Each structure stands twice: as structure tokens, then as C-alpha cells.
Image (spheres, rainbow, N blue to C red):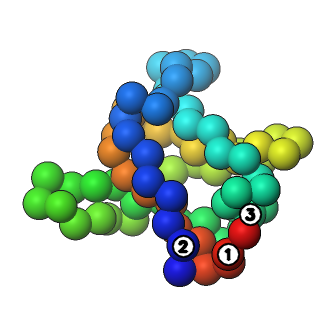
Amino acid sequence: MNSYDFKKEDFASADEGRYRIEFDKNTVGNGADLTVEELLPDGTYSPIQAEIIRFNEQIFIEWSTPFDGRITTDIKY
């Protein structure tokens, strides 16, 4: 399993008070097997049901607030 970490500072403001982070499809795949996980204060990760948007060669993860976390995939790119 491959994972890609991100920080809450990596999020940008999106529509309607939501926040978005962008990944290149060539890095993380087409998004079909992605899992979004939030980093908890105790250092463990918890899966969340964030919105995943595919547009051209980009994958966007949207959530109501920025957070530290990671995306995981079973496919290596």
C-alpha cells in the first residue's frame, strides 16, 4: 500500500466554505482505490468519507475544514 501525506496548510479555499487539496493523477492514480484518512491527535489515522473529484489529470479531495492526513492506494504509480 502506498500513502501520500498532506498537511492542513496544503488545502486551498473552494466553493461554499469548503477546502480542497489537489493531487496529480499520474502520482496517485485515477482515484478508484483511494482512501482518505485524517491524522488524529494520538498519531493514528481514521478513514473519512471525503469528496473525491476527478478533473482532467487532477484528483481533488474536498472537506469542510483543512486537516492533516494522508491518502492511501493499493496501486503503485
From where the camera sits, is residue 24 visible? yes
Residue under label 1: 76
Packing grade of label 2 (10 A; few <14, some 14-19, many >=20) is: few
What amino acid is at disc 1? Lys
41 versus 17 height, above or below: below
Residue under label 3: 29
Q: Residue at x 55, y 33 (%)?
A: 20
Q: Residue at x 47, y 39 (%)?
A: 63
2 versus 20 height, above or below: below
Secondary structure of the residue carrying tag 1 is loop
Dots 2, 1 in contact, CB < 8 A = yes
What amino acid is at disc 3? Gly
What amino acid is at disc 2? Asn
Residue 9, image quadrant: top left
74 versus 3 height, above or below: below
Position of 62 with respect to 5 (left or right) is right
Secondary structure of the residue carrying tag 3 is loop
Residue under label 2: 2
Sequence-wise, which precedes: disc 3 or disc 1? 3
What distance separates the C-alpha of mark 3 from that of mark 1?
Answer: 8 Å
Sequence-wise, which precedes: disc 3 or disc 2? 2
Dots 3, 2 in contact, CB < 8 A = no
Packing grade of label 3 (10 A; few <14, some 14-19, many >=20) is: some
